[in-house]
Structures are given as C-alpha cells and as structure tokens.
Image: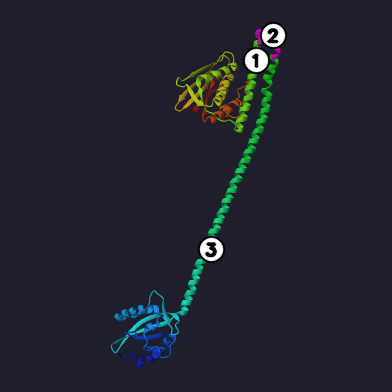
Amino acid sequence: MSAPMVPNEAYREIFQSMSEGIIMVDESGKIAIANPVAEQLFGYEQNELNGKLMEELLPERFRKGHVNFRGAFNADPRPRRMGFGRDLVALRKDGMEFPVEISLSYTRMGGRLLVMAFISDISQRKKTEDALKRSEEQLIVYAAELEKKVELRTEALNVSINRLEEEVIERKKAEEEAKKSLERERELNELKSKFVSIASHEFRTPLSTILSSAALVQQYKNKGDLDKVDKHVQRIKTSVNHLTMILNDFLSLGKLEEGKVEVNVENILVKDFFEEILEEVNSMLKDGQKIIIKCSSDIDRIGSDPRILRNIMFNLISNASKYSEPRTNIHLICETINSTINFTIKDEGIGISLEDQRHLFERFFRASNSGNIQGTGLGLNIVKRYVDLLKGKISFSSEFGKGSEFTVSIPL
C-alpha cells in the first residue's frame, strides 16, 4: 500500500496556522496529516499521529460504529457536521476523554479521496452548558419546592378559613340560640304578666259567683225554695267549668311552649267520640242552644290523636256557644274530601269584624266585639297549634253580626 498523500506546499502554511484542529484521513481511515492544534488537542508529538487509524482517537465503545460511518461518508462525500443531535467524545493519548465538535469535508489528490475533519475541543462550553443545565434543574427543583410550599400554605390557609367559617357559623348559631332564648324568656315573662292580669280578672268573677251562689243556696235550702237552689247550683257549675277552661288553656299553652305535646295516633270511632264531646259540652251550653251533628255515612273511624282532636273540637264548640245567643243552633259537620277529613263548626253568633280577623290566631287576642264575654284570648291560638301538630289546616269565614264558620282539615 502506498504512503498517505499530503497537501502541496501552497496550502501547508494555511494548514499549519489554523486555530482549530484539522486531521486529514484517507479512505482506509489512516491519518495522512494533522495540524499542530490537532496534535495538541489529542496530546501527541509532532507527526506522531501520521499513519494511525482514526478510530484510535475514539473511545473503544465508539470505534466499531465509526468504521460504518466512515464507509457511508466515503460512498457519499459532502461537507456536513458529524454527530448532529448527539454528543461526540474523543480520546487523548493519555486515555482521557473530552467532548468535541467535528465538521467534515473532503478533497481529492492524485485521484484519491481525502477526508478532512475539523475538530474543536468544547470542554469549556460543555462545562458552561452543564452548569446552566444544573442551574435550570435546580431552578425547576426550586420552583417545584416553591409550588409545593405554596400548595401546603394554601391548604393550611384553606383549613384556617374553613375553621374560621365554622367558628363564625357556630358563633352565629350561638347568637341565634341566645337571641331565641332571650325572645322566649321575654315571651314567657309577657305570658306570666298577662296570665297574672287575666287570672286576676277572669278568676275574680266566677269565684265571686261561686261564693255568692253558695251562700244563697244555703238560704234558699232553709226556706225550701228548691227552684232557686237548682238555679244557683247551675251557676256554680257554670263558674267551675269556666275556671276549668281557663286553667286548661294555660296548661295547654305551657305544654305547647315547652314542646312537651306528642302526637299518639289511635283508631277513633267517630260516633262515640262526638257523643263524649257532646256530653261534656252540654253543661256549658246556654239556654235553648242545640248542637246539630251531620256526618257523612262513610265516616266510621279515623286515625288521629283523640286527646288533641278532643281539645280542638271542645275549644271550637265552646267558642261557638259562648259567642252565640241562647236558643241558637251550633252545627257540627264532618265529611271526607280527597285524602282529608273536614270538621266544620258553624254558629249563628256575633261574628268577627274584618279588622279583627287578621289577628284571630294570635295569643291573648280578643275580638273588639267580645264585650263582657269571659275568655283568655288563648283558645284559637291553642287550636291552631294543635292542628299544626296533626299536620292539618284550619280555615274560617265570618260575617260581623251573622256568625262564624271554622273548618279543620286533617290528613287521613
């Protein structure tokens, strides 16, 4: 095999003075010549590289692949960058590896191909790039840590906000409870005050009647005047019934205020239920008053709380009697409509004015035309609360001076 060819003298000076390493290799991979910069890069003496295979300047792991790359370039020689997209590493004489950047070109001498490799040591640049890369990685890590801290702080802040909101809700709830307690205490004080006022007034009249009638009964008994004895005995009974009603109203209101009234549903025989009510209210009716009952034939028994329903009916019937003249009729009508049973109590009494109708179910309210008719103003308020407990509704219609009609609708 002939010796490697070298450039002619015209180019030798340029070749020797280049600032980057230049190695010229023949088609077999042997180094024809290397300039001083290339020799310095690889750590060789002058002309020591001449005749060596190019693969000797590469780490062992790249040599086999480089032979293939060399063959491909020889088949299609053209200027190009070597190793585009990947890092290139060269090997010094002392076995140290260093990063390089290589560009390829070619020339022909004496009809033979010579490949020119322009080699730059990029160690410093790689250090800078690595430093920048590490800085970027550190920045990414720092950003991730910062983001994590922000997330943790945000989460902690959200927890604090939630706790604060819960505290605000609890505080508002406590304030509402305190407000309700104060309102209830105020209402109870008002109730007590009105109770004392009403009791002192309402109790005085029947008690005086009882005392005077009891004294007269004794006198008429001694005289043998039995008709007058019966009359005053009846007055005593009426007064006692009135006192009982007042006490029942206050007891019922007290239980309702305290939430102690519970609903106990039972089967109620309608006929027997009304007979018991009539027997109880007959002693309270005025002279000549009659209760006329009209119930649908299909109503035999219903499911409800008999104690609560009795209080409702007793209050409404006693009101119908109290606010009506003697020898008038009180109508009690019961009928089923859809899934409810309606109880209607209709009287021929004094009626209720439009102005008073707006306040009818308020506690201690008495109509302006009630005059000297005794009462506490609690009856309809209690009735409304009892109807609500049964999940029912109460409605009414009234015309001043012509009577009133109250209807209680209770789900079957």
- The residue that mark 2 highlights is 221
- Residue closest to the eye, 79 or 307: 307
Q: Position of residue 14 (x, y in %)?
A: 39, 89
- Residue 49 in the magenta stretch? The answer is no
Q: Kindly identify the amino acid type of the residue bearing the numbered disc 1.
A: Arg
**What label sits on residue 146 in the rendered view?**
3
* In this view, the mark in front (3 or 1): 3
Q: Kindly identify the amino acid type of the residue bearing the numbered disc 2.
A: Lys
Q: Position of residue 323 (x, y in %)?
A: 58, 20
At a point 65% along the width and 35% down the height, the residue shown is: 186
212 over 94 or under it: above or below:
above
At a point 67% along the width and 22% down the height, the residue shown is: 203
Question: How would you rate the neighbour count of disc 3 (Cα within 10 Å): few for under 14, some for 14-19, many for 20 or more?
Answer: few
- Residue closest to the eye, 410 or 397: 410
SS under mark 3:
helix
At a point 66% along the width and 8% down the height, the residue shown is: 226
User: Mark 3 and mark 1: span between their CA atoms?
Assistant: 93 Å
SS under mark 2:
helix
- Residue closest to the eye, 206 or 270: 270
- The residue that mark 1 highlights is 235
The span shown in magenta is 214-229
Q: What main secondary structure does the magenta stretch of the protein show? A: helix
Outermost residue toward the top in this view:
224
Tell me if residue 97 can be seen. yes
- Drawn side of residue 412 relative to residue 319, left or right: left
Q: Position of residue 325 (x, y in %)?
A: 58, 16
